[in-house]
Image (spheres, rainbow, N blue to C red):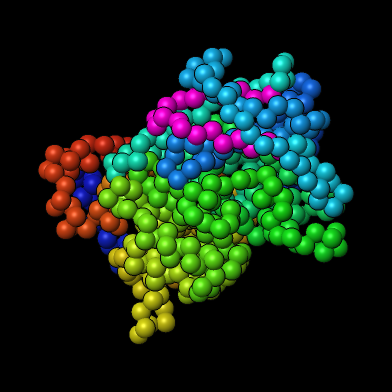
Amino acid sequence: MLVQLLLLSSILLTCVSNGNAGVTSSFIRNEWPSVDIPLDNEVFAVPKGYNAPQQVHITQGDYDGRAVIISWVTADEPGSNQVRVGLSEGKYDFVAEGTVHNYTFYNYKSGYIHQCLVGDLQYDTKYYYAIGDGDSSRKFWFKTPPEIDPDASYKFGIIGDLGQTFNSLSTLKHCMQTSAQTILFVGDLSYADRYDNHDVGVRWDSWGRFVEPSAAYQPWIWSAGNHEIEYFPHMGEVIPFRNYLHRYPTPYPASKSSSPLWYAVRRASAHIIVLSSYSPFVKYTPQWRWLEEELKRVDREKTPWLIVLMHAPIYNSNNAHFMEGESMRVVFESWFCQYKVDVIFAGHVHAYERSYRISNIRPDSSNPVPDKSAPVYITVGDGGNQEGLANRFRDPQPDYSAFREASYGHSTLEIKNRTHAIYHWNRNDEGKRVPTDSFVLHNQYWGNNRRRRKLKKNHLHSVVATLQVGENLDLLSMGM
């Protein structure tokens, strides 16, 4: 029965990818007010105790997943820079020393921002860590990914354009329910730039406390959006990304990048590339040169899943931000097809949309056409910020668009092995998480027949065995 379901789903996906079977959802979102949560709400509560660490978050700290960068803020004084780490709660085997700094933004002065790299960790291991002094110290944990391996299974959550509204809170809570091990964040964090003067910094602080219940335990892989630019000449603030760069470090030197805004990491069986939509990327710029070399470094024998994160989508059929990603498409799309990128996640448009595998690189065509070497493009700028939904899709739905809905939600990508992954988009609906769009993602490198023949017969049987019946039933409700 399971094999039959898999074969049926593959046939359905093949038909969809080669026909005009795109769906525009008729679901009408009953929006909660798109206003930021008041600062006195409990989701922004400052931890108890003098100078207690707050806004705790972690991200990957190296290229291969054996290090984390732990960040936190102390409000009153610098306090301790140390992170105590161990294999059991309350028993810490070693201590790492971090750095501390603060900064001003107009007339706002930040708290003391601590950042500590903890390295030489073991794969697939749960670590406990403590930060802060005395009675004000706080305890957390994280789990390292499995060793780099083509068949390492792993589950990612994907969030974009989050903000700090009640819709944002629903998205965050729903994503935490999925047991995602790492969050891929596609830009536009706090939306603090919608405030002015001192309140810009205040809303960066509140957002840091808002996401801490997830970000202190699961690494968030950061990318920057347009709301991180914060160009405010009237305030004398004209250096882009200042708040973001001070608060959210990335392991960019590990991938030989010259900027924290673009970098790459390897995690389990995935190679994840983060691009900056709002930094120069045309030919011979630093980002262009870096991506050219990074794509050559990708080893699909070890990390078969090639994932790209950016903020502005390359393909988008919404009236909002229509064709804003066109210049990046012209520069990079041929590389995405050449290197057979599996999936590209973007945000920016406050709605959900998934494409078929298409490209617009043929010299004899000015329109996107089906292309088996192309990525699937997925827009998840639906986190819930105060700007509201982008609910005006272009009509008719273009052939490249598979499914679209103006609603809030988040996605998950569960890698099963080197050949298959299960993708879900989950709608927020009246406080409930509703799986709405799903499909089996076939790996671009190992999915072709020549490489499949390299796999042993018993491995192919294990591929089928790992795909759960319940997940494959979801394939039959892809919105078709």
Is residue 218 toward the left or the right of residue 36 in the image? left
Relative image position of residue 63 (x, y in whole percent): 45, 45
Question: Which quarter of the picture shows residue 363?
Answer: bottom left
Q: Quadrant of the N terminus?
A: top left
Q: Residue furthest left?
A: 457
Number of labels in the image equals 0
> Foreground residue, 313 or 334?
334
| Residue 306 in sight in this render | yes
Q: Nearer the viewer, residue 222 or 120?
A: 120
Secondary structure, magenta segment, majority class: strand
* Left or right of 104 on screen, residue 453: left
Residue at point 40%, 56% (across, down):
343
Q: Nearer the viewer, residue 23 or 139?
A: 139
Looking at the picture, does residue 130 appear above or below residue 259? above
Image height of 329 relative to 349, above or below: below
Q: Say which residue appears at 49% left-offset and 25% top-offset.
A: 127
Which residue is rendered at x = 81% and y = 30% of the image? 76
- What residue lies at 39% left-to-right and 32% top-to-bottom? 123
Q: Please say whether residue 30 is one of the residues in the magenta stretch.
A: no
Image quadrant of residue 129?
Answer: top right
- State which region is magenta: 113-132
Q: Is residue 293 above or below residue 362?
A: above
* Residue 52 point in image, percent of width and height: 73, 25
